[in-house]
Image: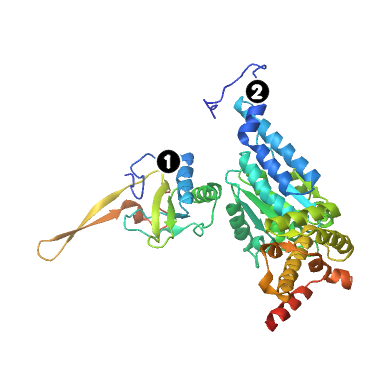
């Protein structure tokens, strides 16, 4: 099941040129671009592992593309995303976040039902991938 | 890879080429003229810039005809004494290469050893890479590059920086241009001990020292930019000053001129206070007189003055 998280996630995967164009757009808006990765696809998994520091003061996408490619090379079977962080006052938040790499096979989720007090039922999501420990998923 | 559909393939040999048109469109002449106007002397440097501009323009035309030639290597080394304009030219170079479409952004990142080399093991590589990433799309200017290599200490982290630099200079030629700068003799020694570096640098530019006449022109240009000018006597006095100053130690070409002018302005301000301030006109404010220059210690004691002017000025203001 294809994970849809962040911007552009219902579009086909971006080519390198398209990723580069998005990064250039971030730089044009003076956003700091960062690269992050994870192997836990749960939608509430907000804080991914950082691939190095967020990159401030960059003028050109070449350096960022280099980092993205390094991360994809090191974690070819992880989710990798690119964030554009806007530090201007009033925003101070991530303005753009999109996935640039995903595992070849995404097993998806199943619904867990839990009997609550009375006859109520609580629902939650469980990812098949997370049945294995971290680092061993998506082999 | 498939050939770009926009680029024609296999054109006949007699396809006409509009070199002049391309030259006009790139507005290179503007930059070169500006260079001629604002940088005095430096003949060999200007010639080299012209050559590079021509090469890049021809390359662009060739690309238009579907001829591939690969990006030329444009890493440079600037050697010359202090104050001969190395940094200034590097700044211009970034702009020129940007106009010629060789670098994408045309910014200059100026660094020295401190910005590249780390303090402890494992610190150097991330630091150097950080700087390289920031310089991508522009020009990386490494001032006094020979400090990167310390022959006496083989465990110096500078070596690591050099290795990373070499790798990027070779593999990411289209992403950034590296300019190394420093004194001639020490740079030559640096290249001798790092032959890999020397061979990856296509252009070795030597900045000659300025002649007294050129130094005067530079000084006048600087004054003009600060909206001052010499009186006729002051110009003569300054000529004399240049000749004397050139014989003295720590002479730094254009930088010495800038400092001398700074002190002359200080003395001028002082003189204006000493005279009747009520009768000042605009002319007084913009004119440097001979006495502002002749008060220099270069004339009195035969040595470069560093703080003499500042002390006098402070004393005078204290009396008010």
Above or below residue B169? Residue B265 is below
Compared to residue B195, the image places residue B16 above or below, namely: above
Using the rendered image of the protein, determine whether residue B150 is visible from the camera's viewpoint. Answer: no
Assign the N terminus of chain A to one quadrant of the image.
top left
Residue A61, x across and y down, in percent: 52, 47
Q: Which residue is outermost to the left?
A: A118
Write down the residue under mark 1: A14
- Residue closest to the eye, B184 or B153: B184
Residue B210 image position (x, y, % from top left): 83, 53
Q: Alpha-carbon distance for marks 1 and 2?
A: 38 Å
Instruction: Estimate how packed mark 2 is, as few (under 14), some (14 to 19) or many (20 or more) residues with alpha carbons within 10 Å.
Output: few
- B153 or B188, which lies in front? B188
Residues behind callouts 1 and 2 on a single chain? no
Query: As drawn, is B242 to the left or to the right of B129?
Result: right
Up the image or down, B136 lies above or below B115; here it is above
* Res B309 visible: yes
Instruction: In the rendered structure, find residue B17 and report the number of the disc placed on it.
Output: 2
- Check the image and name the residue furthest to the front: B279
Residue B286 spot, x, y in % from top left: 70, 62
Image location (x, y in percent) of residue A92: 40, 61
Up-down: is B148 above or below B44?
A: below
Residue at 67 percent across and 27 percent down: it is: B19
Q: Residue B184 is drawn in which quadrant? A: bottom right
For the residues carrying marks 1 and 2, which lies nearer the camera in this image?
Answer: 2
**The residue tagged with tag 1: helix, strand or loop?**
loop
């Amino acid at each position: 099941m294809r994970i849809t998280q962040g911007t552009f996630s219902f579009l086909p995967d971006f080519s390198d040129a398209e990723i580069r164009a998005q990064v250039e757009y971030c730089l044009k808006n003076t956003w700091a671009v960062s690269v992050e990765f994870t192997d836990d696809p749960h939608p509430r998994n907000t804080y991914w592992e950082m691939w190095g520091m967020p990159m401030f003061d960059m003028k050109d996408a070449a350096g960022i593309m280099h980092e993205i490619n390094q991360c994809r090379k090191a974690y070819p079977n992880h989710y990798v995303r690119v964030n554009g962080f806007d530090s201007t006052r009033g925003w101070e938040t991530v303005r753009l976040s999109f996935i640039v790499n995903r595992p070849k096979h995404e097993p998806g989720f199943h619904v867990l039902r839990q009997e609550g007090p009375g006859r109520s039922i609580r629902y939650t999501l469980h990812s098949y991938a997370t049945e294995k420990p971290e680092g061993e998923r998506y082999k | 890879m498939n050939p770009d559909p926009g680029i024609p393939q296999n054109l006949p040999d007699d396809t006409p080429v509009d070199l002049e048109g391309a030259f006009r469109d790139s507005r290179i002449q503007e930059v070169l003229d500006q260079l001629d106007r604002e940088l005095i002397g430096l003949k060999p440097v200007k010639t080299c810039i012209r050559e590079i501009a021509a090469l890049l323009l021809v390359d662009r035309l060739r690309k238009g005809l579907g001829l591939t030639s690969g990006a030329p290597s444009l890493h440079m080394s600037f050697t010359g004494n202090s104050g001969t304009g190395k940094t200034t030219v590097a700044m211009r170079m970034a702009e020129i290469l940007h106009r010629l479409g060789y670098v994408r952004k045309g910014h200059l990142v100026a660094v020295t050893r401190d910005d590249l080399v780390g303090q402890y093991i494992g610190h150097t590589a991330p630091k150097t890479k950080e700087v390289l990433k920031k310089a991508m799309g522009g020009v990386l200017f490494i001032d006094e590059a020979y400090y990167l290599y310390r022959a006496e200490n083989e465990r110096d982290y500078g070596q690591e920086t050099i290795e990373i630099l070499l790798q990027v200079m070779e593999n990411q030629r289209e992403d950034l241009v590296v300019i190394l700068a420093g004194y001639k003799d020490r740079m030559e020694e640096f290249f001798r001990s790092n032959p890999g570096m020397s061979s990856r640098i296509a252009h070795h530019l030597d900045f000659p020292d300025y002649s007294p006449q050129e130094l005067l022109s530079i000084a006048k240009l600087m004054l003009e930019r600060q909206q001052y000018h010499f009186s006729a006597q002051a110009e003569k006095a300054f000529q004399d000053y240049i000749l004397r100053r050139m014989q003295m130690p720590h002479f730094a070409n254009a930088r010495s001129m800038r400092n001398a002018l700074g002190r002359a302005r200080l003395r001028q301000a002082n003189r204006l206070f000493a005279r009747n301030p009520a009768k000042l006109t605009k002319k007084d404010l913009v004119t440097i007189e001979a006495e502002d220059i002749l008060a220099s210690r270069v004339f009195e004691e035969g040595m470069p003055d560093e703080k003499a002017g500042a002390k006098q000025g402070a004393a005078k203001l204290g009396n008010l």
